[in-house]
């Protein structure tokens, strides 16, 4: 081949090669930027969804805690009675009773309302009657008496089935995340009747500000004009309104400017993820549907509005332009340089080509390192798996949560490292884990699962799994998770607060009666034997009068301590009121119950409590009865045990007595003398549990 032709072909091949290298590097820069934009969108939506759900659960827990308060239940009963009187009189305005009940209700809740606003950022607290009629809004005291079940599906559902609810919904004076719980009042027959609904709502501005700080992004919530105008009162609607939307809340002011200028327009094509320029700055905007309670229950329903999340990408765009220029500026001189040396020596051309190839590889590795840095700065754990379920990437947060090093997990299956057992030791199959199901069917999933650490300990995590598609083919999945153990512990603490006596730690009256009803139902289904002890501390009033109530409280706590040392862990102790306690003994007949009661009596008598260097000796009287198949409510076994307790006191106290069906009382018993008050004997105490 002629030299000139060889040189020409070599030059042409070299030019083509350098053009291909430059184009490949250029496309790699673009692809990495697109991946970054897509990952930002996924992360924004996942973080918003997780915090939104956590806030909804917190609102529901607060509503349940308030509804479980016996003082709130009592005020609901009084409010209901006042409204009933008003309706019987066919009055359109408040009568004296209903107005007085509302003022009393508001005055009693004022302190707790202030604490909820300052400590929990609560901005809406409403009390409604069981039929959905608004009785009192703490945030809008002059607005009451309306019934909005026709336009509020969440309120209509709780009115219908009395179950707790949470979610995003628009109310007459509030729009945001709400938690609702039904308050019930015990009936004389052992059942309960609903007396009112507690509704708690959080301020959305505070949530958006926290998200702004966490994601370093602006965030705004837009509500559809028609949906807002059809429910909210005019004085309480958001102040910023555009042609199609209300701006409910925004962490930064840009959103209002964009909407008013027409730069952004409401669209039903959600979600959206795109870049745009504004006043010399570049922004990434992520828009997705703001689903309320109705659209969550019916996905085909029109969303309530739109969530806008935006980030200033000006510096990143400048960096992208530099990367593009670097690819062009490095490729062209390299080609000219290579062409010059091609005419001198083919060997130099070969060396130059290798140098340029190495330089291009270094630029590509720098881009990969930049993406890895973004991955490692995420607060949530992020892990990627291929189509075989093996780990392809994992960030520092995930490694820190599990206690592994990077080289120990790459290429291995998460199931072998992180998911192999829960706190109870139960080991589920790999195919049942959410990330493997997503790898198999390509569907995104969210779940709460137990994850394990390297040392064998476990923690509860909220997991979101998103499939990875490359060229319309499933190529693995991305797993985003965070530790929710502390959140779950707070929820359990609220449950303990609602079911235990704050002084002694025993079950409170309501919870004990629930356990007794459950044991009666179990015994009717499966048979067996169960006993109940009714105890009363002898001459306890004398201790309070002589030593003070603080000493009396110490004696009560000491008694519960002795009981816990005496009974089994499966036995249940409850404080029914004052110095009166009941102990449920599942699986024990009256013989075993009597032996246990006698041990308890002797232990309490022989172990005085020391208060201020004074030994306070107290005794206990105990009545014993069994649970029978024909007991339809908790009143029957409690009454028999109470009769046995009365017999123990009549016989001189400090003794145990087993109920005898053949007893014939020769004098009126205390409960016979106050028969009209008997239904109140087993009513919950009207005391607030701290």
Image (spheres, rainbow, N blue to C red):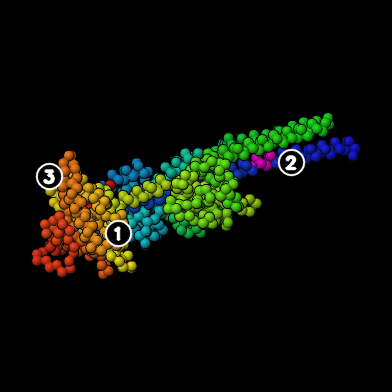
Q: x, y percentage for residue 279? A: 56, 36
What range of the chain is rendered magenta? 25-30
Badge 2 density bin: few <14, some 14–19, many ≥20, Cα 10 Å = few
Looking at this view, is 5 or 459 the one in front?
Answer: 459
Looking at this view, is 199 or 88 the one in front?
Answer: 199
Badge 3 density bin: few <14, some 14–19, many ≥20, Cα 10 Å = few
Q: Which residue appears at 39% of the width and 55% of the height?
A: 165
Disc 2 is placed on an element classified as helix
Q: Earlier in the sequence, mark 1 or mark 2?
A: 2
Which residue is disc 2 drawn over? 20
Tag count:
3
The answer for how far apart the CA atoms under marks 3 and 2 are is 98 Å
As drawn, is 256 to the left or to the right of 549?
right
Q: Which residue appears at 50% of the width and 48% of the height?
A: 418
Q: x, y percentage for residue 341? A: 80, 30
Nearest to viewer (mark 3 / mark 2) = 3
Which residue is disc 3 drawn over? 546
Q: Earlier in the sequence, mark 3 or mark 2?
A: 2
Q: Is residue 257 visible?
A: no
Q: x, y percentage for residue 285? A: 55, 44
Q: Quadrant of the N terminus?
A: top right
Q: Which residue appears at 34% of the width and 49% of the height?
A: 494
Answer with the quarter of the image where residue 185 lies. Answer: bottom left
- Residue 515 tag number: 1
């Amino acid at each position: 081949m002629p030299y000139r032709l060889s040189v020409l072909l070599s030059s042409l091949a070299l030019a083509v090669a350098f053009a291909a290298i430059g184009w490949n590097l250029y496309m790699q820069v673009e692809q990495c930027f697109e991946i970054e934009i897509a990952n930002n969108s996924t992360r924004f939506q996942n973080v918003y969804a997780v915090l939104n759900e956590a806030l909804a659960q917190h609102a529901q827990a607060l509503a349940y805690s308030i509804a479980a308060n016996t003082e709130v239940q009592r005020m609901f009963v009084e409010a209901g009675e006042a409204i009933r009187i008003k309706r019987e009189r066919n009055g359109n305005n408040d009568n004296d009773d209903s107005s007085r009940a509302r003022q009393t209700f508001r005055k009693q809740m004022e302190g707790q309302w202030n604490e909820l606003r300052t400590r929990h950022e609560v901005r809406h607290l409403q009390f409604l009657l069981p039929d959905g009629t608004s009785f009192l809004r703490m945030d809008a005291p002059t607005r009451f008496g309306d019934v909005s079940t026709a336009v509020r599906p969440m309120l209509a559902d709780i009115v219908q089935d009395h179950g707790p609810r949470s979610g995003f919904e628009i109310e007459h004076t509030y729009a945001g995340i709400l938690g609702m719980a039904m308050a019930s009042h015990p009936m004389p027959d052992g059942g309960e009747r609903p007396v009112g609904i507690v509704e708690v709502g959080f301020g959305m501005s505070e949530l958006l500000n926290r998200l702004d700080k966490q994601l370093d992004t602006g965030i705004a919530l837009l509500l559809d004009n028609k949906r807002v105008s059809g429910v909210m009162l005019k004085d309480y609607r958001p102040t910023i309104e555009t042609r199609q939307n209300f701006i409910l809340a925004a962490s930064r002011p840009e959103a209002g400017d964009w909407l008013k200028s027409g730069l952004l327009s409401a669209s039903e094509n959600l979600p959206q993820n795109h870049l745009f320029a504004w006043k010399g700055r570049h922004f990434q905007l992520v828009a997705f549907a703001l689903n309320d309670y109705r659209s969550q229950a019916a996905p085909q329903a029109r969303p309530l509005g739109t969530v806008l999340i935006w980030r200033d990408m000006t510096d990143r765009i400048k960096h992208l332009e530099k990367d593009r220029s670097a690819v062009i500026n490095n490729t062209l001189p390299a080609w000219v340089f290579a062409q010059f040396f091609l005419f001198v020596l083919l060997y130099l051309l070969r060396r130059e080509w290798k140098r340029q190839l190495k330089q291009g590889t270094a630029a590509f590795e720098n881009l990969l390192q930049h993406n890895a840095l973004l991955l490692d700065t995420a607060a949530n754990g992020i892990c990627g798996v291929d189509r075989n379920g093996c780990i392809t990437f994992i960030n520092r947060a995930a490694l820190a949560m599990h206690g592994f090093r990077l080289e120990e997990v790459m290429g291995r299956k998460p199931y072998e490292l992180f998911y192999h057992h829960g706190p109870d030791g139960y080991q589920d199959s790999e195919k049942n884990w959410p990330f493997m199901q997503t790898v198999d069917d390509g569907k995104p999933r969210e779940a709460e699962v137990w994850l394990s650490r390297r040392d064998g300990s476990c923690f509860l995590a909220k997991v979101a799994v998103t499939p990875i598609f490359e060229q319309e083919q499933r190529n693995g999945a991305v797993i985003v998770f965070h530790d929710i153990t502390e959140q779950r512990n707070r929820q359990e603490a609220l449950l303990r607060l609602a079911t235990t006596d704050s002084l002694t730690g025993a079950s409170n009256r309501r919870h004990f009666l629930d356990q007794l009803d459950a044991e009666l139902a179990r015994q009717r289904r499966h048979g067996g034997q169960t006993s109940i002890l009714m105890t009363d501390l002898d001459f306890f009033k004398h201790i309070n009068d002589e030593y003070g109530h603080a000493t009396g409280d110490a004696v009560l706590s000491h008694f519960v301590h002795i009981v816990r040392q005496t009974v089994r862990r499966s036995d249940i102790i409850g404080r029914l009121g004052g110095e009166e306690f009941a102990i449920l003994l599942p699986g024990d007949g009256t013989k075993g119950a009597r032996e246990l009661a006698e041990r308890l009596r002797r232990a309490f008598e022989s172990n005085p409590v020391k208060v201020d260097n004074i030994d306070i000796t107290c005794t206990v009287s105990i009545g014993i009865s069994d649970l029978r198949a024909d007991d339809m409510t908790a009143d029957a076994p409690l009454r028999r045990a109470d009769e046995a307790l009365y017999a123990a006191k009549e016989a001189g106290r400090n003794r145990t007595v087993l109920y005898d069906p053949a007893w014939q009382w020769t004098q009126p018993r205390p409960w016979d003398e106050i028969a009209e008050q008997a239904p109140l004997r087993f009513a919950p105490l009207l005391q607030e549990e701290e």
